Image (cartoon, rainbow, N blue to C red):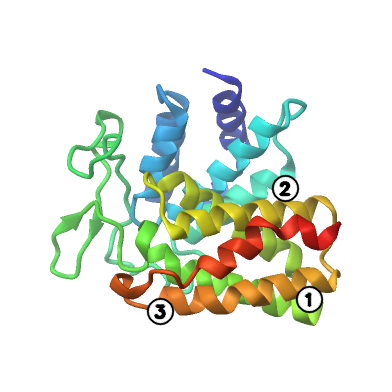
Amino acid sequence: MDRNQQYLTMLLEKVPKWELSDPQHLDAFDKIKNSLANATELHDQLKALYRVSNLSDFALGLMWIVDRVDRDPSKLESTLEEESFVLNLLKKAFGGSSSEPAVPDQPFGFDFPQAETMSTPSDAVESVPARLLPDGTASLAPPEGAGVEGSEANFSSTLEKLLEAVQSGSEERTALLDELTLQAEGIVAAQASASDYKTFCGYLMEFLRYVSANQLFDDIRVMNLISNVYDPFSQWAKTDPSVRSGILEQSIEMLRDFKALFE
């Protein structure tokens, strides 16, 4: 078990799981925790978790924490903030704070696909039910609006919220910036091949980290840049994939050279 896996395992052990009152949710969390602790390759298991119905945000949160640990050798023990962050993502996954509350007769479950497929579940979690479709059949595929492609609308929505928060000076700026960074990191990690989407998210992620590290939330240049890249991305997200070519080029160029604005 490497340092990142050990850190994540210890963090999940400290999450106050008793706040998950449903026994099925407690059991699902324990199986997730054990699968990650025993994974041969942590990043592959997190990517598999990202593809599971309702668990994409939770997986992105764990990816974000692992990335922070990887970049900071001094991080040896999880913080209360991280533990609360993970608990909130769990509650959202189980329907506790989601905009679409869980349906009582639709059991929550998860399954880990093998590395690049969605067909064969891992033995460690084979007893947990998959998400049920309206016709009663089980499916391991993410529901509409989830997964890499479905994340486009969610990503655009978070980017819009961040822009509004920056424009208004809202205290939510920091949380939204962290959330958008988390989403961007997950998209970059989940996309195997190069694409404008992956490139855009990669450069945006670098920009957001720079803003956070230098506490530039009140800088007018930050608001202007976010505004300038939001409109093209919003248009791209709403456009049919077959005719998207070129829409993000200018935004990607601005993000690639963002440091020139602050010199």
Relative image position of residue 214 (x, y in whole percent)? 84, 53
Relative image position of residue 4 (x, y in whole percent)? 59, 27
Identify the mark nearer the N-term, 3 or 1: 1
Residue 84, above or below 243: above
* The C terminus lies in quadrant: bottom right
The residue sitting at 36% across, 68% down in the picture is: 145
Residue 140, above or below 75: below
SS label for mark 2: helix
Per the image, the residue denoted by label 1 is 170
Q: Nearer the viewer, residue 27 or 33?
A: 33
SS label for mark 1: loop
The disc at residue 238 is: 3
Distance between mark 2 and mark 1 Cα atoms: 20 Å
Viewed as shown, does residue 166 lie left or right of 147? right
Hey, which quadrant is residue 12 in on the image?
A: top right
Per the image, the residue denoted by label 2 is 81
Q: Nearer the viewer, residue 16 or 49?
A: 49
Hey, which quadrant is residue 222 in on the image?
A: bottom right
Q: Within 10 Å of the Cα at label 2, are there few (<14), some (14-19), or many (20+) other Cα atoms? A: few
Relative image position of residue 105 (x, y in whole percent)? 27, 66
Relative image position of residue 1 (x, y in whole percent)? 52, 17
Indicate the amino acid at tag 1.
Ser
The residue sitting at 30% across, 63% down in the picture is: 143
Distance between mark 2 and mark 3 Cα atoms: 35 Å
Q: Nearer the viewer, mark 3 or mark 1?
A: 3
Q: Nearer the viewer, residue 200 or 86?
A: 200
Indicate the amino acid at tag 3.
Lys
